Image (cartoon, rainbow, N blue to C red):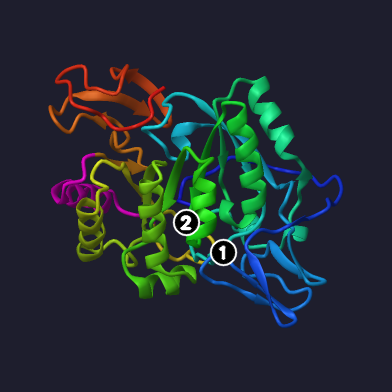
């Protein structure tokens, strides 16, 4: 999703599962209108949506991705990336096939850009996911790798059960969703990392087959619903790395109440349909961070970068080192509570 190199386990198929009736749809004559995301696909009989995971079967919209786990892993929470949410803990990561974007730089195209029945999956129920998290004392479950909003019902049912067992829920998403399903999900969601692809609607359509403004509305909704947010911007050379686009994005964030939301600039590596683009230069990463800080953002991180300590947490008030990290691992943690131990400044996040 966001440029991080993933190491998950692709599942070997056991058997095909019964599909669950999807949420958020209506009938229009003999067709079905999906009302989960802004695409609002109009589906004839046996037709799949753009996400590959929702299908019109005999007048019902079915969520074919339900219980279809195509990837499972135990990850450090920092890999999502979330650096202000339960630092140093492990999260149970799960994915089902599908995505409502068609990003040319997709890192996980083999599972996100394919039909559900064409991807090796295993039947893993919400109960089994939650039981696994409980058994191993993982404090959170992360819905990740593909686009969790396209396996909405699977995520929602698992998250609801997880909350009843005091397990937190994390969504790693491009944020392309309509307001009603998002508000419902927010009731059982604790944290989200949202991929903000760029700050130009035409480029969004070209690179991702999506649009910018629904994603901005998702960010505003998550903030209003008190879901902890972190934002990832994958810097792709000659696509979204101009000073103008970076400045526009950071200015919007700083002037709309996101100044304390961690922003992760992630380094691009050639992938999928963008094999001809070279990795993001370190100079571009450092320039983006400088622009963000100058715009008033307080917590700016550099991901997929080994040449500098881009994921350390620094107090924006006194400049002292709070958390030192090395490749998803915490080396030193001076932040035992939500306040800087050196100057007393509040450091926003969920720390315990």
Label 2: few (<14), some or many (≥20) within 10 Å?
many
Q: Earlier in the sequence, mark 1 or mark 2?
A: 1
Which residue is at a point 78% across and 77% down the rendered structure image? 45
Q: Secondary structure at mark 1?
A: loop
Residue 209 x %, y %: 49, 71
Depth check: give the residue in front, 72 or 252.
252
Q: Which residues are magenta?
A: 279-298
- The reply to whether callout 1 and callout 2 are in contact (CB within 8 Å) is yes
**Residue 9 rendering spot, x and y as whole percentages:** 67, 40
Main structural element of the magenta stretch: helix, strand or loop? helix
Q: Which residue is mark 1?
A: 100
Compared to 309, does 29 lie above or below? below
* Residue 4 tag number: none
Q: Hey, which quadrant is residue 340 in on the image?
A: top left
Q: Quadrant of residue 300?
A: top left
Q: Is residue 273 left or right of residue 123?
A: left
Residue under the image location 79 percent in, 55 percent down = 19
Question: On screen, 253 above or below 335?
Answer: below
Q: Which residue is mark 2?
A: 174
Name the residue nearer the viewer: 96 or 267.
Answer: 96
Q: Is residue 170 visible?
A: yes
Whole-percent x, y for residue 165 in the image: 62, 26
Residue 179: x and y in percent read 48, 60
**Is 295 in the magenta?**
yes
Q: Is residue 150 magenta?
A: no
């Amino acid at each position: 999703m966001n440029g991080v190199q993933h190491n998950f386990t692709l599942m070997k198929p056991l058997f095909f599962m019964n599909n669950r009736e999807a949420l958020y749809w209506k009938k229009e004559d003999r067709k079905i209108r999906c009302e989960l995301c802004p695409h609002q696909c109009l589906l004839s009989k046996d037709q799949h949506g753009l996400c590959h995971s929702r299908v019109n079967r005999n007048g019902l919209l079915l969520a074919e991705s339900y219980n279809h786990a195509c990837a499972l892993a135990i990850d450090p929470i920092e890999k999502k990336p979330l650096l202000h949410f339960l630092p140093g803990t492990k999260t149970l990561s799960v994915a089902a096939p599908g995505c409502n974007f068609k990003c040319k730089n997709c890192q996980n195209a083999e599972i996100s850009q394919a039909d559900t029945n064409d991807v090796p999956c295993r039947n893993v129920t919400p109960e089994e996911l939650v039981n696994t998290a409980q058994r191993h004392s993982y404090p959170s479950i992360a819905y990740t790798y593909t686009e969790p909003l396209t396996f909405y019902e699977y995520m929602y049912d698992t998250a609801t059960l997880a909350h009843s067992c005091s397990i937190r829920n994390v969504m790693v998403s491009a944020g392309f969703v309509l307001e009603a399903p998002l508000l419902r999900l927010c009731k059982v969601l604790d944290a989200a990392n949202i991929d903000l692809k760029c700050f130009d609607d035409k480029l969004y359509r070209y690179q991702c087959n999506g649009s910018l403004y629904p994603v901005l509305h998702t960010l505003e909704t998550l903030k209003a619903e008190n879901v902890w947010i972190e934002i990832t911007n994958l810097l792709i050379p000659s696509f979204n790395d101009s000073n103008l686009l970076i400045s526009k994005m950071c200015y919007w964030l700083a002037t709309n109440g996101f100044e304390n939301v961690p922003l992760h600039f992630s380094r691009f590596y050639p992938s999928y349909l963008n094999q001809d683009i070279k990795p993001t230069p370190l100079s571009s990463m450092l320039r983006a961070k400088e622009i963000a800080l100058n715009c008033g953002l307080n917590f700016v991180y550099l991901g997929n970068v080994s040449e500098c300590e881009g994921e350390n947490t620094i107090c924006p008030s006194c400049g002292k080192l709070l958390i030192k990290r090395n490749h998803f691992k915490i080396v030193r943690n001076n932040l035992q509570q939500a306040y800087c131990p050196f100057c007393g400044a509040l450091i926003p996040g969920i720390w315990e």
